[in-house]
Image (tube, grey):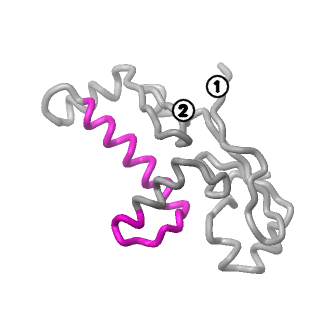
Amino acid sequence: VDYTTYVPGLLDSSKETAAALEGGYSNSQFPPNEDGGAATQQIAADLKAIGATEFVTQGASIGYWSADVMIQMLEDIDGEITPDNFRTLAESGWEYEPLDGGIGPISYPEGHTNPAPCAGMVKVEGGKYVSAVKFQCYDLIEP
């Protein structure tokens, strides 16, 4: 089990890598394509709308979710968009509301250091990623 080997497209591009990872599990902090959720479908549709391939890569997921958080923050700024107003919002207890099936809610300022409390797990089976544990959110345990 690891946190690094879920990279959509990796197994198809390297059969040797697929063979080496066979039977292994990877924890994903963003919704895996293999779950087929509404949020992943939305990313694919948005990629298609801009003329890009509909394949949702790891980079596309990370970029999409980061941009979605940023857009919501900018929309919620009270007054003009300035560095001070942005900082005030980001330190105010502001909460991100994800798309259905997305990365999960994040509140700030805790979100500066704590991840969204959600994860899924994929397994490499027959040279392909398959969903082993559907992406879901949970409560963080206090240290």
- Left or right of 65? Residue 20 is right
- Left or right of 12? Residue 53 is left
- Left or right of 80? Residue 67 is right
Q: Is residue 126 above or below residue 97?
A: below
In the image, residue 30 lies in the stretch drawn in magenta: no
Q: Secondary structure at mark 1?
A: loop
Identify which residue, 65 or 43, lies in the foreground: 43
Q: Secondary structure at mark 2?
A: loop
Residue 114 has which mark? 2
Tell me the residue at 68%/76% (across/down). Answer: 12
Residue with the mark numbered 1? 140
In the image, residue 53 lies in the stretch drawn in magenta: yes
Tell me the residue at 55%/36% (across/down). Answer: 115
Give, as a single range, the part of the protein colored magenta.
Answer: 47-76
Residue 135 occupies which quadrant of the picture?
A: top right
Kind of residue indicated by mark 2: Asn
Mark 1 Cα within 10 Å, few/some/many (few <14, many 20+)?
few
Q: Looking at the magenta stretch, what is its main secondary structure?
A: helix
Residue 55 has which mark? none
Residue 8 lies, in percent from the top left, at: 62, 65
Identify which residue, 79 or 114, lies in the foreground: 79
Mark 2 Cα within 10 Å, few/some/many (few <14, many 20+)?
few
Residue 30 lies, in percent from the top left, at: 58, 48
Judged from this view, the residue extending furthest toward the left is 80
Kind of residue indicated by mark 1: Leu
Q: Is residue 43 above or below residue 51?
A: above
Identify which residue, 126 or 92, lies in the foreground: 126
